[in-house]
Image (cartoon, rainbow, N blue to C red):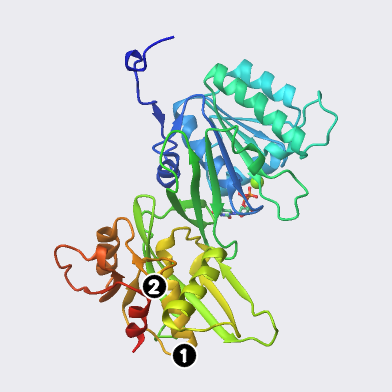
Amino acid sequence: MRRLSEIEAREQARNPTGIEEFDRVLGGGLVAGAVVLIGGDPGIGKSTLLLQALASLSERGPVLYVTGEESAEQVALRAQRLGVSGDGVDLLAEIRLEQITQALVERQPGVAVIDSIQTLYSGELTAAPGSVSQVRECAAQLTRIAKQTGITLILIGHVTKDGALAGPRVLEHIVDTVLYFEGDTHSSFRLVRAIKNRFGAVNELGVFAMTDRGLRGVSNPSALFLAGHSREVAGSCVMATQEGTRPLLVEVQALVDTAHVPNPRRLSVGLESSRLAMLLAVLHRHAGIATYDQDVFVNAVGGVRIMEPAADLAVALAILSSMRDRPLPAGLLAFGEIGLAGEIRPAPRGQERLREAAKLGFGLAVVPRANLPRQPIEGLRIQAVDRVEDVLGVLA
Ligand code: TYD
Ligand code: MG
């Protein structure tokens, strides 16, 4: 046993992947012996991103790409199409765990990618590849090897909606870092979010644009999720959300329409559905806005997911605007949490959000009183609100 204060605490050395937006979500780069799980829908770009990262990492040491999903030829073809050099990348087309662990121990690559964990198969178990017990056992064995040898392992996992494969969720507690791809598969932007990170901040977001030469980082994404209407429309409100270290401006849309069924529909895409139900109850109780006979749909534009409660105010404004079929004033932006008692609570880092909005040409911000900046922000008029009743005045 030792005293905590006697133990030398060193920051872990980082091995940057050279892909800036990827390094951002990783907390600066990869850590030796760490296991990173990266999940996402099929076709969203997992293999592409990791192949790009490995090609870049190979300039500084040996790397290994294990493909259980595609043949070696398919991976080579992709590398060629992306224009990445495969010179330093070792490739192993294998699904047998024992073979893979042997290759890892023999070759000692600095970084290895397993594409995907759900294709692996340990001969010691009788269960089928992709089953919970196989996925768990393979990941646990690989994790042990990473810790023993200092090899950084990146496990790719598919998220499947039908549950035919064990999802990456069953591995979240085993690994050090969990990243998920999100975003609309139909849009050309891809987001990578850190859900868990022993070596960095969570909720950091990496933003990429898809190109025919692979994923390219978008270093200034703040205006990416604005729909860009040619004129004002009802049911739309822009919010400033703080994702990780950067503010993002996102358009929130709402549609409120007469329900023709006894149980009106409540649907939210990219926003928390439980908060929508709560918000509608607060609007009714404290502002007299009734929606019991209305369907309510809300959506965050561009497939971005907003998990923070500071979205409440923008959602409420979009709902009101849709109900009254009246657009909000041009250049308006809002953020703030709405409490059950109808109070409007401040959002963290309000100043940064406001400054980003001003930079992008927004002229009016509706914010919780506690978020009023101490000094005026040039070009931005700020309206403070205390209670949900005050919000009605914004549309008057
Ligand atoms: P892929 O990386 O194979 O997705 P996943 O491994 O998550 O299933 O990408 C799917 C397809 O999209 C693949 O044919 C390559 C193509 N693609 C591009 O052309 N450019 C890009 O920037 C990305 C991310 C993918
Ligand atoms: Mg793939």
Q: Nearer the viewer, mark 2 or mark 1?
A: 1
Q: Is residue 213 above or below residue 186?
A: above
Quickly name the residue at label 2: 238
Q: Residue 172, image x and y in percent?
A: 60, 38
In front of the other: 137 or 324: 324
Looking at the picture, which amino acid does disc 1 mark?
A: Asp
Could you say which is closer to the camera, residue 239 or residue 301?
A: 239
* Residue on which the image places disc 1: 325
- Horizontally, is 80 left or right of 365 in the view? right
Pointer 2 or 1: first along the chain: 2
Q: Residues within 10 Å of mark 1 (few under 14, many from 20)?
A: some
Q: Residue furthest right?
A: 126
Instruction: Classify the position of the N terminus by image quarter.
Output: top left
- Report the side of 125 relative to 112 (left or right): right
* Residue plotted at (41% across, 76% down): 237
Secondary structure under tag 1 reads loop
- Rendered residue at 61%/20% (across/down): 145
- CA distance for labels 2 and 1: 17 Å
Apparent side of residue 345 relative to residue 183 in the rendered image (left or right): left
Residue 151: quarter of image? top right
Residue sitting at 42 percent across and 90 percent down? 326
Residue 265 appears in the rendering: yes
Check mark 2 vs ligand 1: CB closer than 8 Å? yes or no: no
Question: Circle 2 sits in a helix, a strand or a loop, which is it?
Answer: strand
**Mark 1 within 8 Å of ligand 1, using the beta carbon:** no
Above or below: residue 348 compared with residue 317:
above
Please identify the quarter of the rendering in which residue 14 is found: top left
Does 165 sit above or below residue 55? below
Tell me where residue 290 appears, x and y as whole percent. Answer: 52, 84
